[in-house]
Image: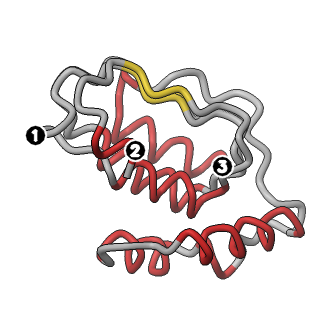
Amino acid sequence: ECVRKSKKLRSLLLDENAIGSRGALSVVQALSPDTHPDLEVVSLAANGISGATAEVICRICMALPKLTRLELDANRIDPRDVQILLDLCGGRLGDMGDNVPRADGEQSSANTTSDVNSRLNSSKISTTAMMADNSEETRD
């Protein structure tokens, strides 16, 4: 809600906040070209974001008219997903170094593309659900 109401934002810097995929998606869902026309930088580095969620984040952020940089480094993004992000974001995507996918090579069920798209289509994610999901992500 705070992000949605902050219509004069030029930079949104939330690096190293352990908000996970669900928290990051919730924040980015509050952004729109109509309410945030001057937003230039969105930085969500080191938050445990999955590749599927990062793709949805890219799609939302690329609609922001003045966005010059989206930072998603040091998350849990697989190298093949990095290529998808580069294709979507082009030169607006920051350095993608230090991304570490899960050791078992799988995404948690909370981070599958269909689940992320489902969350994107829902109007609200409760704070309680986000907190519970983030605690599960840290146990992955």
Which residue position is annotated with label 3? 77
Residue 70 at least partly seen: no
Horizontal side of residue 66 vs 77, given as left or right: left
Q: Label 2 vs label 1: CA separation?
A: 16 Å
Is the image coloured rainbow, by chain, by secondary structure, or in one colour? secondary structure
- Dot 1: element: loop
User: Of the residues shown, which amino acid type is indicated by label 1?
Assistant: Asp
How packed mark 3 is, by other alpha carbons closer than 10 Å (few <14, some 14-19, many 20 or more), is: many
Q: Is residue 66 above or below residue 35?
A: above
Q: Earlier in the sequence, mark 3 or mark 2?
A: 2
Q: Earlier in the sequence, mark 2 or mark 1?
A: 2
Q: Nearer the viewer, residue 105 or 5?
A: 5
How packed mark 2 is, by other alpha carbons closer than 10 Å (few <14, some 14-19, many 20 or more), is: few
In the rendered structure, find residue 2 and report the number of the disc placed on it: 2
Q: Residue at x 79, y 73 (%)?
A: 136
Horizontal side of residue 109 vs 127, given as left or right: right
User: Of the residues shown, which amino acid type is indicated by label 2?
Assistant: Cys
Q: Nearer the viewer, residue 128 or 39?
A: 128
Horizontal side of residue 5 vs 23, given as left or right: left
